Image (cartoon, rainbow, N blue to C red):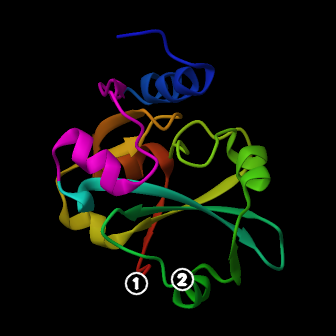
Amino acid sequence: MSELSTSEKRVDEALRAFGSKATIVKLDELAHTAQQAADALGVDVAQIVKSLVFRGKETDAAYLLLVSGANRVHERRTSKQIGEKLSRADAEFVREHTGFAIGGVSPLGAVGDVKIFIDQSLLELGDIWAAAGHPRSVFPTSVQELISITGAQPIDVL
């Protein structure tokens, strides 16, 4: 495997710290979208975990939603489940709270305090793929491992 970037190393270190055997896969092409990642890996788009960062309107807290690539977040319903109105985070907020650029936000290795929730529809899947800190890098995992590693709380995002 080629040399890992600083962001990818942070993800790799988090994987090792939790005892995961997953390895980071570098894609030949950019995968800014779930569909691009699915096409590059030859998997269904539902198996791609989108890492979407939202900003709490009242507390300014960072919320990371781990969502199936086949789904869109219903912000109002999701806000009710989380207990705070949400708004989409801009690139600066995402970088400040996660340490990652949009398009490569990983569920692991955030540099700040981020509250993590996971799309409960992912629970129906076996193998999934998540971003590894760069738009060209991903790692394979299972939903149960991802919940265990991140402490994500399953919610209905639809």
Residue 135 appears left or right of 126: right
Q: Is residue 138 above or below residue 145?
A: above
Query: Which residue is denoted by mark 1 in the rendering?
Result: 158
Where residue 121 appears, x then y in whole percent? 29, 72
Q: What stretch is highlighted in magenta?
A: 20-43
Q: Residue 78 bears which disc, if any? A: 2
Is residue 40 on the magenta stretch? yes
Q: In which quarter of the image is residue 90?
A: bottom right
Q: What residue type is labelled 1?
A: Leu
Numbered disc 1: secondary structure: loop
Residue extending farthest to the front is 29
Residue 37 appears left or right of 61: left
> Callout 2: 10 Å neighbours few (<14), some, many (20+)?
many
Q: In this view, does 68 lie above or below 151?
A: below
- Could you tell me which residue is drawn at 16 percent across and 44 percent down? 42
Residue extending farthest to the right is 59
> Callout 1: 10 Å neighbours few (<14), some, many (20+)?
some
Q: In this view, does 105 lie above or below 116?
A: above
The earlier-in-sequence mark between 1 and 2 is: 2
Figure disc tally: 2
Where residue 76 appears, x then y in whole percent? 58, 90
